[in-house]
Image (cartoon, helix red, strand yellow):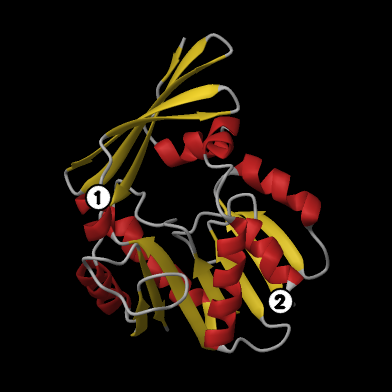
Amino acid sequence: MTNDTSTWFTSWFDTPFYHILYKNRDDTEAHAFMDTLTGYLNIPEHGTILDLACGKGRHARYLNKIGYDVTGADLSENSIDYAKQFENHRLHFAVHDMCKPFGKQFDAVFNLFTSFGYFDDDADNLKTIKAIKENLNDFGFGVIDFMNSEFVIDNLVPEEVKTVDDIDFHLKRYVEDGYIIKDITFTADDKLYNFQERVRGFTLADFELLFEQAGVHLLDVFGDYKLRKFSAKTSERLVMIFK
């Protein structure tokens, strides 16, 4: 049996295999980034944060742990169902399309770990920036943590096999029509699965144009989770702060 998908982010993210493949993400680094970022933004004590495209809530849960009132939103029903077990009076999760305003304003809106640029329709990227703008209060900051596409393309590993929980994930990476694409093939329980991740290879210039069209102002640009200076050639991340 082969499982093929077209709208990849509505299906791949909802499978247990997505979370298996990426289970070894560095929580220590993620937590340090949240400490650094919230300190830099000077978010008020008990301030409100929207974690947009929160997945299973690893960032949202930590932000709540260090004192913030956090809402995690994601399109994946399975991820939100999982995250809801951690809810408390200052931590909530909801299924939500990030192209649309959430209907509430926050001190900060975080879109982390390259959770942007999935859409086949370019108009949805602009809609997302506009929605983030509507989700911010008068003093709020938006943050998009994206890959540095130029660095990623220059250092692309065309093929590799990652074995996680006895599953051999065969990964192929390439660039096509402005997208950075990863084909993922594996066999589990005697079934053959094929998934594809497609992320628009946005550069800083591309984001600057989106921000201008959305009527938001880019305030700071950083190149890693320690908020060091961005270099298009050498930085692994593109962290943008705007309002």
Is the residue 105 above or below the residue 29 in the image? Answer: below
Residue 168 as seen in the image, left or right of residue 121:
right
Q: Is residue 184 left or right of residue 68?
A: left
Element type at mark 2: loop
The residue at the far right in this view is: 89
Q: Which residue is mark 2?
A: 68
Q: Is residue 38 visible?
A: yes
Mark closer to the chain start, 2 or 1 = 2
Label 1 environment density (alpha carbons within 10 Å; few <14, some 14–19, many ≥20): few
Q: Position of residue 60 (x, y in %)?
A: 65, 63
Q: CA distance from mark 2 to mark 1?
A: 37 Å
Figure quadrant of residue 173? top left
Label 2 amino acid? Tyr
Nearer the camera: disc 2 or disc 1: 1
Q: Amino acid at mark 1?
A: Asn
Residue 139: x and y, percent? Answer: 53, 91
- Residue at image x 27%, y 46%? 180
Residue 105: image x %, image y %?
59, 78
Q: Which residue is mark 1?
A: 155
